[in-house]
Structures are given as structure tokens and as C-alpha cells.
Image: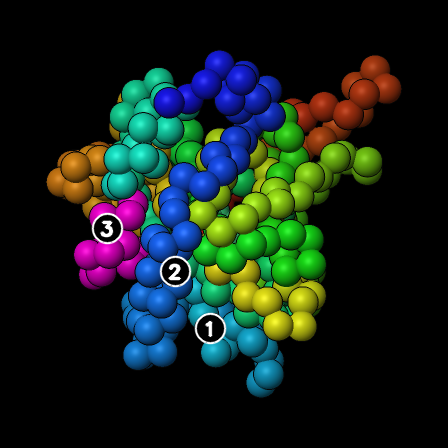
Amino acid sequence: MLTPEQRSFYDEQGYLIVRQLFSKEEVAFYKAHYMRLRGQGTYPGDLAGVDVTGNDPLKKYPRMIHMHRWDEVSLKWLIDPRLNAYLTALTGREPYAVQTMLYFKPPGARGQALHQDQYYLRAKPGTCIAAWMALDDCDEENGCLQLVPGSQHWPVLCTVPADTTQSFTDVTVPLPEGTPVVPAIMQAGDVLFFNGQIVHGSLPNRSRDRFRRALIGHYIEGHAEIVARFYHPVLRMDGTPLELGQSPDGSECGVWVERDGRRTIELAAVQAGPGKTE
Ligand SMILES: O=C(O)CCC(=O)C(=O)O
């Protein structure tokens, strides 16, 4: 299913958009399902983010997390054979599934500052990989995902404080001036696969009336032996749990330095783990 062109795009850029992997009918089903769940109450792990003001739209539509642990629809999506086929082809081996998330991102909602997922998951050996499915058409106006092509080759960078007027999370990674950040312009039903090391995030939803809903699965490579505690139980792609170890709380991180007139990354320190989840 993965074409040679898709393979080389992913290897070079660190991400790949597969167009219309899910049908319009499926998208309509998931949208209705999650809007109904959101309207029905609160769930473990609901997150509106830091600095939530009285009129923050995220208060009304907090992100849902790990729904696959209590919602059969989410579990089935997480291990869907289409996602598995791409993830297996991209990483060379069937991965393990560890997380679901649903971002509602209503008009006016903040985004998530640039970050690397591996900072949170700390899967080793190897890294993590995400499947990010658009439930609404998304572009720069409603806060589509943005990525730094090629950054999958970087180590996990040491984090710095984020601008919490723009981001619902409070850490980000510094980038040298002029580093290209590209928008992932997608239609509902497209799936974006991205490497766990790649720098990505999103800006606020500046539209007047367009949600930017996304259903997201996080996976770790099939040779991983440890992952951060928050992501247990780890699942095989048939939905059965398996025992993996827990990664230590904290990891080495890189900082930008100038060498021979070039910006490069040097491993500098061990930074504490996020202490909370993404
Ligand atoms: O959807 C977003 O705006 C951020 C999602 C994200 O960063 C992730 O799934 O790792």
C-alpha cells in the first residue's frame, strides 16, 4: 500500500499525509460520536490546558485522552488495519498502540506549541509515531498542524517556556531563526503520520466558526522495550495488552550551539520528564 514515493517522502521529511484513508461517512460518524461523548460529561484526563480564563473555548471543549481505555469505538480506530498497514510499512515492524486523543479545537481555541512527542513518550529503543486524522478540513486559519521537515533526525531538545496565550501547553522547543515550519493542509479523512522526534505543533484557531477536530493515535516502534508510565498498558495491534518496562523519568536533551558558523545540536543535560502528560 505504501508507494516508493510515499516511502522516500517520509524518510526525507519525517511525515506523510495519506489522503482520504477514511471515508466521509466514517468521518461523519466519528464527529457525531465524539461530540455526543463530549456533551455527555467529563472523562478521566480531560484537559483544557494551562492558564484557562473564564471565556477560554477550551473550557467548553477540553481535549479527551486515552478514550480507547473506556470507549470501544476509539479502541477499534486505534488498531484499525489501515492505520496498522501504514505504521508497519513506515517503521518496518508492527508497532504497539499506547494513546488516543481527541482535539476539538473550537474557533478561538489556543494551539499547542512546537514540541516533540518523544519528549513525553520516551520510547526506547527507537521512537514513537503518530497517526493524526483530520475530522474537519484544516488549514492555517483554523490551526492545522505544522511541522519542521527533517527534524526527525534531531535528538529530543531541551524545552523552554511557551507563550501560553497561544498554546494550551507551557513548554516548547527553540528553533534557529529561519527554520522552515510547514503547514499540513488536510481534508477530513486524511491521515498524517509523523515520526516521534519531529518538531510539530499548531497555532490558535483564528476562524470565526470552523472547528478543527482531530482524532489522534500514538504508537511506539515494535522493538521498543520501555515507554513512560503514563502510556501503560501498552497494546498490540490486535488490542491485547503486553508488558513493557517503564522509561526513567527524565532524559538527555539537546541544545543549539554554533560550530564553525553553523547551528548544530549538542546533547547538554538530562531534563526532568514533563511531570504531567502532553
Ligand atoms: O493537534 C494538535 O494541534 C497537536 C497534536 C499533537 O501535537 C500531537 O498529537 O502530538
Reading the image, the residue beneath label 1 is 61
- Alpha-carbon distance for marks 2 and 1? 18 Å
Which of the marked residues, 2 or 1, is nearer the chain's N terminus? 2
Instruction: Between residue 184 and residue 234, name the one nearer to us.
Output: 184
Give the image location of residue 213, x and y in percent: 49, 60
Q: Amino acid at mark 1?
A: Tyr
Q: Relative to 139, is 234 above or below? A: above
Reading the image, the residue beneath label 2 is 28
Which of the marked residues, 3 or 1, is nearer the chain's N terminus? 1
Residue at position x 54%, y 31% in the image: 15
Task: Please report the bounds of the magenta region as a residue range.
Answer: 66-78
Reading the image, the residue beneath label 3 is 75
The answer to whether residue 167 shows anywhere in this view is no
**In what element is the residue under mark 3?**
helix
Is 117 displayed left or right of 34 in the figure? Answer: right
Q: Amino acid at mark 3?
A: Leu
Q: Is mark 3 within 8 Å of ligand 1?
A: no
Q: Quadrant of residue 68?
A: bottom left
- Alpha-carbon distance for marks 3 and 2? 18 Å
Residue at position x 82%, y 36% in the image: 178
- Alpha-carbon distance for marks 3 and 1? 21 Å
Instruction: Between residue 256 and residue 93, name the one nearer to us.
Output: 93
The answer to whether residue 79 shows anywhere in this view is yes
Disc 1 crowd, CA 10 A, few/some/many (<14, 14-19, 20+):
many
Instruction: Between residue 60 and residue 197, name the one nearer to us.
Output: 60
Residue at position x 57%, y 22% in the image: 9
Which of the marked residues, 3 or 2, is nearer the chain's N terminus? 2
Asked if the stretch drawn in magenta spans residue 65, the answer is no
Q: Are marks 2 and 1 in contact (CB under 8 Å)?
A: no
Circle 3 or circle 2, nearest the eye? 2
Q: Residue furthest right?
A: 261
Q: Amino acid at mark 2?
A: Ala
